[in-house]
Image (cartoon, grey):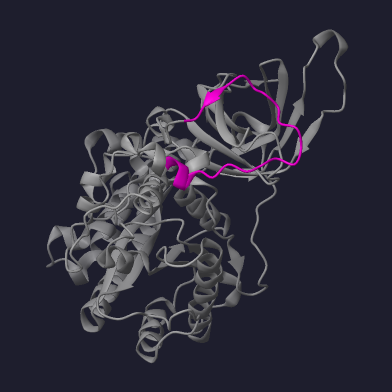
């Protein structure tokens, strides 16, 4: 009785892989991984429900689910590879897995399907199940869109139509994300990339995919994968990403949030920012090695170059002295304090670059410009609002974080960051009480400043970056390394402010109120 259901599970595995069983093991990777994970999860579930007698039946059910998803991903990849070869396209892949554990602190796992999973990682992500794939498409020889336009060239339109045919039978949710190089303004690039993503999503809809399952997003130049000072790098950055995930649309949101919080993109942008004011050797247009164009030592940027990047403003209101010192360095070590997450590795980054994460501070970097996920059916942003307390990082479920700096009391509220991807789901208001006296505390702060917020999720912390939306505010921006455990005090932090047309920095390490 116990042998039969296990035999069924094994039969499912070989039935779904039989048509490609003569190919190398690497070619069957998605299917075999899906089967193995599905079988393991099913066995655990069967054991939980029906004890030892349920293990085999659970394994059979799990194998059916896991193999089906893995097989579907594998067949799509084979079709995409054929398209890439026929149309001279460059297509990179990443597998997407989610955790079956309800208390998982980060349930999205993004990994290049060409990467080798170590024994340590295999154990760490043993409960993860393959739910989809991200395919990133760029052209090797032609520009896909007419310059400055959301309309594809005739050749690219035909390519997108062939691409949509590969996905037309999908029952999963699909997100189309547009990316650009850094030519032009960030605002224009974001708007243009969104229009182009919507254009491609519409082609997918015309192929028969329900518009309710199609979403689009314009990331602009916010997620570069190569140096923008080289033509070869710009070509890689001009790309379209197709993300297909089985399950709720919220999984697309989690994927997008995780990409936004990836430190590698922040580091890549910082390198491009410095390159704009610091001449570097040009990379050959035919070179595929973009690593040689990205190893700028941010600590060695001259004071003259700092002034080119950071332009102080003349405040129309009296400045607040936070007792800091003049900012002379634009490099920040906070990216190292946060620590790169292994599961954020992505196929488009070279291994040499992935180990060299560094970044500018918030003043020199400035706020990124990217877009929200929008539904093709409604044209409106897709937002998840039904978060539970357990969905947030500890101490960041709409809480207040405060610190007294040079006699002035500063508060950030609400601080709300979800654990699945480390995304901020609301921007805090900056509240400042000048010359704060605990014994005679006033209820109304002297300043209440709206902000925008960015987050970058690491193994040991979260870089919580806050930008004032008011150019006349006493604070320009803040970089805070927040703890991702139950610690109620920031690991490190800086706030940047203006005084006498000069940018100053002061330590700012808020505590949970």
Q: How many marks?
A: 0
**Which of 15 and 204 lies nearest the eye of the viewer?**
204
Find out whether residue 277 is within the magenta segment: no
**252 is higher (above) or lower (below) than 296:** below
Query: Residue at horizontal 25%, vertical 45%?
Result: 295
In the rendered image, which quarter contains the C terminus?
top right
Q: Quadrant of residue 212?
A: bottom right
Residue 460 showing in the rendered view: yes
**Which of 173 and 469 lies nearest the eye of the viewer?**
469
Residue 225 coordinates in the image, percent (x, y): 34, 56
Query: Residue at horizontal 25%, vertical 79%?
Result: 141
Report whether 482 appears left or right of 472.
left
Residue 175 coordinates in the image, percent (x, y): 50, 66
Which residue is farthest top?
439
Query: Residue at horizontal 70%, vertical 40%?
Result: 315
Report whether 256 appears left or right of 293.
right
**Which of 13 and 490 lies nearest the eye of the viewer?**
490
Query: Residue at horizontal 50%, vertical 43%?
Result: 310
Report whether 287 appears left or right of 296.
left
Residue 54 showing in the rendered view: no
Report whether 302 appears left or right of 105.
left
Residue 97 coordinates in the image, percent (x, y): 40, 50
Residue 156 coordinates in the image, percent (x, y): 37, 84
Q: What span is colored magenta in the figure?
A: 306-327
Q: Quadrant of residue 306?
A: top left
> Would you say the magenta stretch is mainly helix, strand or loop?
loop
**504 is higher (above) or lower (below) than 174:** above
């Amino acid at each position: 009785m116990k042998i039969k259901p296990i035999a069924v599970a094994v039969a499912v595995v070989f039935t779904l892989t039989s048509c490609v069983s003569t190919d190398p093991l690497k070619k069957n990777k998605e299917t075999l991984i899906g089967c193995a994970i599905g079988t393991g999860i099913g066995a655990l579930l069967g054991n939980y429900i029906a004890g030892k007698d349920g293990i085999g039946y659970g394994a059979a059910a799990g194998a059916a689910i896991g193999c089906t998803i893995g097989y579907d991903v594998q067949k799509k990849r084979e079709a995409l590879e054929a398209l890439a070869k026929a149309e001279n396209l460059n297509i990179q892949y990443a597998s997407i897995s989610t955790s079956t554990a309800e208390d998982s602190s980060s349930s999205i796992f993004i990994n290049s399907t060409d990467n080798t999973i170590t024994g340590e990682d295999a154990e760490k992500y043993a409960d993860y199940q393959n739910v989809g794939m991200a395919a990133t498409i760029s052209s090797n020889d032609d520009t896909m869109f007419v310059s400055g336009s959301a309309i594809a060239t005739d050749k690219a339109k035909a390519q997108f139509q062939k691409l949509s045919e590969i996905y037309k039978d999908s029952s999963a949710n699909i997100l189309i994300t547009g990316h650009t190089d850094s030519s032009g303004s960030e605002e224009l690039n974001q708007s243009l990339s969104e229009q182009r993503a919507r254009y491609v999503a519409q082609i997918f809809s015309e192929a028969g995919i329900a518009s309710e399952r199609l979403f689009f997003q314009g990331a602009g130049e916010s997620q570069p994968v190569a140096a923008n000072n080289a033509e070869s790098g710009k070509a890689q950055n001009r790309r379209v990403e197709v993300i297909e995930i089985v399950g709720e649309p919220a999984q697309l949101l989690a994927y997008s949030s995780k990409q936004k919080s990836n430190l590698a993109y922040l580091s890549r942008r910082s390198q491009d920012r410095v390159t704009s004011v610091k001449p570097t050797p040009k990379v050959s247009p035919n070179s595929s090695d973009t690593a040689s164009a990205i190893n700028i030592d941010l600590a060695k940027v001259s004071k003259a170059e700092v002034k080119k990047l950071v332009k102080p403003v003349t405040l129309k209101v009296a400045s607040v002295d936070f007792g800091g010192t003049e900012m002379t360095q634009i490099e920040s070590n906070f990216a190292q304090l946060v620590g790169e997450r292994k599961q954020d590795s992505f196929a488009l980054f070279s291994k040499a670059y992935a180990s060299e994460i560094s970044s500018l501070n918030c003043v020199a970097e400035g706020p990124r410009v990217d877009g929200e996920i929008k539904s093709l059916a409604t044209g409106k942003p897709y937002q998840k609002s039904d978060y539970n307390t357990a969905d947030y990082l500890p101490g960041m479920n709409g809480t207040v974080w405060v610190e007294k700096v040079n006699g002035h009391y500063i508060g950030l509220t609400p601080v709300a960051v979800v654990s699945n991807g480390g995304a901020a789901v609301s921007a805090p208001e900056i509240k400042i009480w000048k010359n704060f006296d605990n014994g005679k505390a006033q209820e109304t702060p002297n300043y209440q400043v709206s902000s925008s917020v960015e987050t970058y999720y690491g193994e040991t912390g979260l870089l919580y970056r806050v930008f004032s939306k008011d150019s006349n505010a006493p604070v320009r921006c803040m970089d805070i390394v927040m703890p991702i455990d139950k610690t109620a005090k920031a690991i490190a932090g800086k706030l940047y402010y203006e005084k006498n047309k000069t940018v100053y920095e002061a330590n700012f390490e808020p505590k949970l109120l």
